[in-house]
Image (spheres, grey):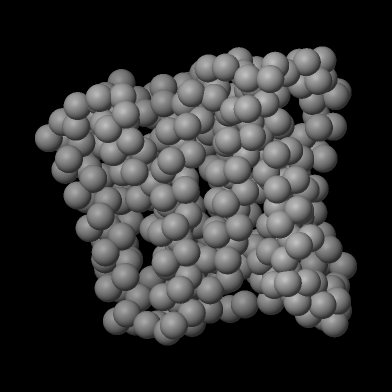
Amino acid sequence: MSASRTQGLALAFGTAVISGVSVFVNSYGVRVVHDATVYTTAKNLVAAVLLILVAAGSRTFARQRAVASRRVLTRRSWAGLVAVAVVGGSVPFVLFFNGLARASSTHAAFVHKTLVVWVALLAVPILGERLGLLHYTAIGLLLVGQAALGGGLSGFAFGTGELMILAATLLWAVEVIVVKRLVGAAPPDILAVARMGLGVLLLIGWVAVSGHWSALTGLSAEGWRWALLTGLFLAGYVATWYRALALAPAVDVTAVLVLAAAITAALDAIVKGTVVTPQAGVGIALLAAGAGLIMVARSRRTPVLAQ
């Protein structure tokens, strides 16, 4: 395994940790800000501002910007930046959090964690990533593990909420592919700023035309405190996630991200006193095994990537 892939997978694991903690914290934040669209916009605004402020004072970002300025961005590349904001930083957030308000959190988590399946289906023909038997086995373990962690998905059905979350997940899968195609022309930190900066402008526009503007401007101090906390996690998530995608294959980093479910379950058990059932324990073990297989698969076979 190359050093860049190793670093990319390490960053992906960091992203999984951030995601797992973020999901846990968001379970409290959404109870304070009852309007899902307003909550999403507020925390995304915080994340965008944080990423821009960090980028403004970052020498690494300055170097990336200088490199990007020397590259000729085609019309397709500029369209790609806008696409990242639409399919990554705005529309899916509205779909996901509105869907979460209508669906079981367990079912929502499972649907969202199918992201690795959709990324795999897109990455093979579009990015040229090659998957072997170990990859497919790993993806299967990750899905079964997530289902076991959710209690077997008893009573699962595709209602309006689940469909909205599926739509958001499909858009995020497209985002992964677009980012992988753009990292050659635009560095990951610039893409992260574009994703959240342009994305939040679209969200604010949607809030204004959909009748939620007064709820956003009248958000309580407690609501903004939760937005600040969850926005901080979101900024860290995007920054590490995009850097991981720049260094390692899309399927690999997306598979590692599924470990976030195990981290959220562990926090539920520690903080809320939730009992970890034997079935949930099996689920966590399967998630760990699936992530481990991804590491083994990539060390045994190096894919051909079409950048």
- Please say if 101 is above or below 83: above
- Counting from the top left corner in percent of width and height, residue 25 is at 47, 32
Q: Nearer the viewer, residue 30 or 121?
A: 30
- Horizontally, is 30 left or right of 60 in the view? left
Residue nearest the observer in this picture, 304 or 242: 242
Q: Front-most of 111 and 64?
A: 64
In the displayed structure image, the side of residue 56 where residue 34 appears, left or right:
left
State which quarter of the image contains the N terminus: bottom left
**Where residue 200 appears, x then y in whole percent?**
76, 40
* Image quarter hosting the C terminus: bottom right
- The answer, for residue 150, to whether it is visible in the render is no
Residue 40, image quadrant: top right
Q: Does 190 sit left or right of 293 as displayed?
A: right
Q: Residue at x 73, y 18 (%)?
A: 219
How many marks on residues?
A: 0
Residue in the image at 55% along x and 51% along y: 237
Q: Is residue 187 above or below residue 231?
A: below
The residue positioned 76% from the left and 53% from the top of the image is 52
Q: Is residue 250 above or below residue 149?
A: below
Would residue 230 be found to the left or right of residue 27 on screen? right
Residue 149 placement: quadrant: top left
In this view, the residue in front, 260 or 301, is: 260
- From this view, report whether residue 36 is shown above or below residue 116: above
Which residue corresponds to the image point at 36% horizontal and 28% vertical from the top-left?
A: 106
Q: Residue 121 in the image: state x and y as whole percent.
A: 48, 59
Residue 207 visible in the shown view: yes
Q: Where in the figure is residue 288, as x and y percent of width and height?
A: 25, 55
